[in-house]
Image: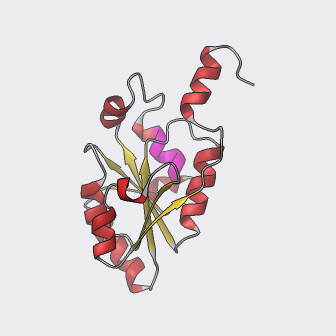
Amino acid sequence: MTADKILTPAQLPAVLAAWRAAGERIVFTNGCFDLLHLGHVDYLEKARALGERLVVGLNTDASVRVLKPGRPLQDEAARARILAALAFVDAVVLFGEPTPLQLIELVQPDILVKGDDYALDGIVGHELVLARGGQVLTVPLVAGYSTSNIVKKIAAGLAH
């Protein structure tokens, strides 16, 4: 069941330990992932290709509302289940803090990934990952795809 990939922070350490024992590199990324689109799928697939396991930190509904007024369009349970259904996502963990730093501290990823719209020194948790000998990388985003753009098209009656 894809729902089995949705983990609590308390469940995560045992899963991470098993992956590490198998010699698997753990990649971490995070986001709101409201209205999953081609840009999200491409980004997550590229992130997963950097290691053997991909952990996605997913903003709770409350934290999305702070970051993006009027959103989310889909609740956290739906967003988590949709992400978990992707073959290249190994775990989804909700977080409600303003940043994913606490979750990054828990995961201790080998590779921390964000889109190339971020500067490396602007990626939350980069110091922690680099200090442990990990990597902080960006992956190219697919131009023109964003939830905000989709919402604008729908609002304008131009969705195709």
Residue at 45% over, 58% down: 5
Q: Quadrant of residue 144?
A: top right
- Horizontal relation, residue 142 to residue 100: left or right: right
Q: Which region shows up in magenta?
A: 78-83
Q: Residue at x 40, y 47 (%)?
A: 58
Colour scheme: secondary structure
Q: Is residue 59 above or below residue 127?
A: above
Q: Position of residue 27 (x, y in %)?
A: 45, 67
Q: Quadrant of the C terminus?
A: top right
Chief secondary structure of the magenta portion = helix
In this view of the protein, can residue 41 be seen by the observer? yes
Q: Is residue 16 magenta?
A: no
Identify which residue, 114 or 49, lies in the foreground.
114
Out of 76 and 32, give the one closest to the viewer. 32
- Residue 149 image offset from top left, x and y in percent: 60, 29
User: Residue 98 sits in which quadrant?
Assistant: top left
Q: Residue furthest right?
A: 160
Residue 50: give x, y in percent of width and height. Answer: 54, 71
At 60% across and 62% down in the image, what residue appears? 46
Where is residue 18 shown, x and y percent of the image?
A: 38, 79
Residue 11 is at least partly visible in this image: no
Please say whether residue 81 is one of the residues in the magenta stretch.
yes
Q: How many marks?
A: 0
In which quarter of the view is residue 14 placed? bottom left
In the rendered image of this protein, does residue 19 appear above or below residue 125? below
